[in-house]
């Protein structure tokens, strides 16, 4: 489990699009271009500081109006229309996304393609696979 987040808190790390054809599965798109499985330490420290500030403010009893209590995690922000800048398939960037020399989230792209494009066992149903604390959600 990621030590930077409280238990039960999930965050989106990346979006992967894998297609399956006669030639086999192929990773055709992923965002961000270099996904990270963990938050940079500076962001993790800021999140911990924000949480401790919220704890100390809660008991202060000041007369300020209630404010929304949330911690901002840039990697978990929903994609909006403005967010489409930089969304490009790897193929457009001149790279073959399924090159076996590429790694994504610490796994070879080949392995992820085979693992995340299940055959008959998934029977066109949503599935969930957990590897080393990372949960991959699939929807054929």
Image (cartoon, rainbow, N blue to C red):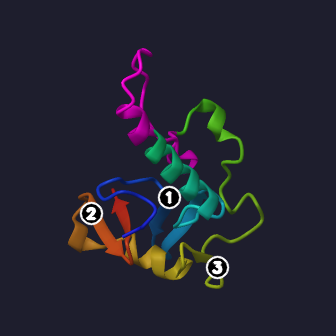
Q: Is residue 34 magenta?
A: no
Looking at the image, do the residues carrying marks 1 and 3 touch, with CB atoms under 8 Å apart?
Answer: no
Which range of residues does the magenta coloring cover?
54-78
Q: Residue at x 48, y 41 (%)?
A: 53
137 up-or-down from 129: above or below: above
Q: Earlier in the sequence, mark 3 or mark 2?
A: 3
| Residue 102, numbered label | 3
Residue 4: x, y in percent? 46, 62
What type of secondary structure mainly makes up the magenta span? loop
- Whole-angstrom CA distance, mark 1 to mark 3, is 18 Å
71 up-or-down from 66: above or below: below
Q: Which residue is under mark 1?
A: 13
Relative horizontal placement of residue 24, taking residue 42 as reference (left or right): left
- Whole-angstrom CA distance, mark 2 to mark 1, is 17 Å
Residue 139: x, y in percent? 33, 56
Q: Residue at x 60, y 63 (%)?
A: 41
Q: Earlier in the sequence, mark 1 or mark 3?
A: 1
Q: Residue at x 36, y 66 (%)?
A: 135
Q: Which residue is under mark 2?
A: 127
Question: 10 Å neighbourhood of mark 3: few (<14), some, or many (≥20)?
Answer: some
- Whole-angstrom CA distance, mark 3 to mark 2, is 25 Å
Residue 39, image quadrant? bottom right
């Amino acid at each position: 489990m990621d030590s930077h987040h409280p238990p039960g808190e999930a965050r989106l790390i990346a979006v992967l699009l894998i297609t399956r054809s006669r030639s086999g599965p192929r990773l055709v798109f992923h965002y961000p271009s270099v996904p990270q499985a963990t938050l940079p330490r500076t962001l993790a420290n800021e999140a911990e500081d924000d949480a401790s500030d919220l704890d100390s403010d809660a008991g202060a009893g000041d007369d300020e109006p209630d404010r929304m209590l949330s911690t901002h995690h840039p990697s978990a922000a929903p994609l909006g229309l403005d967010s489409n800048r930089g969304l490009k398939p790897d193929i457009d960037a001149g790279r073959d996304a399924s090159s076996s020399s590429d790694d994504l989230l610490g796994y070879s792209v080949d392995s992820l393609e085979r693992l995340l494009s299940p055959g008959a066992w998934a029977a066109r149903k949503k599935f969930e696979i957990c590897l080393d604390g990372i949960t991959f959600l699939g929807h054929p």
